[in-house]
Image (tube, rainbow, N blue to C red):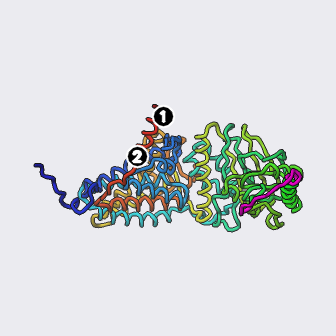
């Protein structure tokens, strides 16, 4: 007779299959190690010389990028503590649109230093208290480091915009930032509203077309649709536009009915009345002054025939989101079904034409007049992964423009700000009494990972660079940063590497909050996973069936 072991302790009150981890070694240190692993992945992608990662997601889609937000999105991280860092990076990406890598890497560095303190005997609560004091001091010092005169800027001045955007774009596409910044600045300035704080990032669209190179890229005031026109009319100048969301076709009645036809003559008349009805509708649209019809659904053969007769150009946009953007670009109101549009509902475009770019047929709707609300950056590149990466650089540039419309203050880039923060925090830690000072000192040390990583990624001697930065900052030069091209330390006002104050502030805040949240956890209680086939198991089974 065998005796079954009764569960004891916390397991006795939980359902079967629950896992319970507690204590410093099992919970806190394990969580810290998971976060360190995540930050190790993203850290090598930091800065202009950051390495690319090749990520293949569960749908077999390939990503080749150094954009931390894309990397962590596609990794499908399962560990609950590492997920906290991913959420912090997503919050940074949504708030500012840049600095996700700094958020994850800095949080990982803070936790690594916290682990050392825990092993020395400090309690996580004391470390959290020290970290909270440090972040308050960081905000105070950051405001001191703001470049004087940068509080006010003209968001329509291209040079000022490019100087603030360059660092964000260079971290994604080093060496091509001048071309990309110029394109993005032009596109953003074109669609900037009277009150810049209302700038909408969705108004700058990106059209990716294979072939050519970045130097072939251009800006279009208006929209670029990756589709051909329906019918034979391919070009219209100074045209009024009617938009029909439900399609351009004969609509079926809502109630079912039966038509009884006695003779061939009646059948002929029935077909003619349908034809006459369609012609009447198309003629009404033509008489309203519309030269272009944009359909959100199918375009019937008969309707197209009459559109050709009345010299009306027909476009079909299947995506309802693209249709809304087109309405915004042309200033039109979408009608649900084919009917005579009122003059107020008609939109206007300067020109709409079908062109071929790099073997791809596209329809370009231009609106050169002022007050246009949509601008498109046409990107050219040799492969899909290069185009995707260029698009991420453009997105970062547009998001940076949005951030500078709200807060245009800038701080020195190229690791100058981080070293100055580290130095000031160390002085602050030395003045503190109590066990908090060790945590504040470690927080200050954590900033050193930025110059170290930038130097390592560029193949420079990190120790020498950090030593010379500390020497320069100790003698009062707060703008001394790394010039990665020459491999030496230089004043950032010469190299013109500036970071937005908001990007730095939110990245450091989110990283500190994420690190403190992870440190506060002392127990992990995990339920048994719900039943049902697992996705990876199902995929493996499917692959096995295909091989058979």
Can you say which quadrant of the picture contains the C terminus?
A: top left
Residue at left offset 64%, top offset 57%? 161
Which residue lies under the disc numbered 1? Answer: 546
Figure quadrant of residue 255: bottom right
Of the pair 25 and 407, the residue shown nearer to us: 25
Instruction: Point out the residue furthest to the left here.
Output: 1
Label 2: element kind: helix
Instruction: Point out the residue furthest to the top here.
Output: 548
Residue at left offset 85%, top offset 52%? 267
Which residue lies under the disc numbered 2? Answer: 40
Q: CA distance from mark 2 to mark 1?
A: 37 Å
Residue at left offset 82%, top offset 67%? 342
> Is 458 situated left or right of 229 in this image?
left
Magenta residues, start to end? 253-268
The answer to whether mark 2 and mark 1 are in CB contact below 8 A is no
Of the pair 35 and 228, the residue shown nearer to us: 228
Compared with 197, 239 (above or below) is: above
**How many other residues sit within 10 Å of disc 1, few (<14), some (14-19) or many (≥20)?**
few
Label 1: element kind: helix
> Is 9 situated left or right of 506 in this image?
left
| Residue 392 coordinates in the image, percent (x, y) | 58, 49
| Residue 454 coordinates in the image, percent (x, y) | 47, 46
């Amino acid at each position: 007779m065998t005796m079954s072991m009764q569960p004891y302790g916390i397991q006795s009150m939980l359902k079967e299959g629950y896992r319970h981890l507690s204590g410093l070694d099992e919970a806190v240190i394990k969580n810290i190690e998971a976060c360190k692993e995540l930050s190790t992945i993203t850290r090598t992608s930091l800065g202009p010389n950051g390495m690319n990662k090749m990520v293949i997601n569960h749908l077999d889609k390939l990503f080749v990028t150094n954009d931390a937000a894309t990397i962590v999105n596609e990794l499908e991280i399962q560990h609950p503590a590492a997920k906290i860092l991913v959420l912090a990076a997503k919050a940074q990406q949504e708030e500012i649109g840049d600095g996700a890598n700094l958020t994850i890497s800095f949080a990982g560095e803070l936790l690594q230093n916290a682990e050392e303190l825990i092993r020395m005997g400090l309690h996580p609560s004391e470390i959290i208290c020290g970290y909270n004091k440090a972040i308050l001091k960081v905000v105070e010092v950051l405001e001191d480091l703001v470049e004087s005169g940068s509080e006010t800027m003209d968001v329509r001045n291209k040079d000022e915009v490019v100087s603030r955007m360059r660092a964000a774009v260079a971290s994604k596409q080093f060496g091509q930032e001048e071309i990309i910044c110029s394109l993005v600045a032009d596109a953003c300035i074109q669609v900037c509203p009277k009150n810049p704080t209302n700038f909408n990032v969705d108004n700058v669209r990106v059209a990716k077309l294979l072939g050519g190179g970045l130097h072939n890229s251009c800006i279009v005031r208006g929209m670029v649709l990756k589709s051909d026109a329906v019918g034979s009319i391919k070009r219209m100048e100074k045209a009024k536009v009617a938009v029909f969301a439900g399609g351009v076709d004969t609509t079926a009645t809502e109630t079912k009915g039966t038509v009884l036809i006695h003779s061939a003559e009646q059948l002929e008349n029935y077909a003619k009345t349908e034809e006459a009805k369609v012609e009447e509708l198309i003629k009404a649209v033509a008489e309203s002054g519309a030269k272009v019809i944009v359909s959100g659904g199918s375009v019937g053969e008969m309707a197209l025939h009459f559109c050709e007769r009345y010299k009306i150009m027909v476009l079909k946009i299947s995506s309802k989101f693209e249709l809304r953007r087109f309405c915004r670009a042309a200033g039109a109101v979408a009608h649900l079904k084919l009917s005579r549009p009122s003059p107020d509902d008609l939109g206007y475009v300067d020109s709409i034409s079908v062109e071929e770019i790099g073997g791809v047929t596209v329809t370009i709707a231009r609106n050169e007049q002022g007050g246009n609300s949509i601008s498109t950056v046409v990107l050219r590149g040799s492969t899909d992964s290069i185009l995707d990466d260029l698009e991420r650089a453009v997105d970062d540039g547009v998001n940076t423009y949005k951030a500078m419309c709200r807060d245009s203050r800038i701080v020195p880039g190229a690791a100058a700000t981080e070293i100055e923060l580290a130095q000031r925090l160390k002085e602050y830690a030395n003045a503190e009494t109590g066990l908090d000072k060790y945590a504040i000192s470690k927080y200050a040390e954590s900033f050193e990972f930025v110059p170290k990583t930038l130097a390592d990624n560029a193949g420079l001697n990190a120790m020498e660079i950090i030593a010379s930065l500390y020497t320069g900052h100790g003698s009062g030069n707060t703008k001394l940063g790394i010039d990665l091209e020459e491999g030496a330390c230089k004043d950032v006002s010469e190299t013109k590497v500036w970071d937005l104050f908001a990007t730095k502030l939110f990245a450091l805040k989110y990283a500190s909050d994420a690190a403190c949240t992870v440190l506060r956890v002392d127990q992990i209680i995990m339920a048994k996973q719900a039943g049902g086939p697992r996705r990876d198991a199902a995929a493996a089974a499917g692959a096995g069936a295909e091989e058979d």
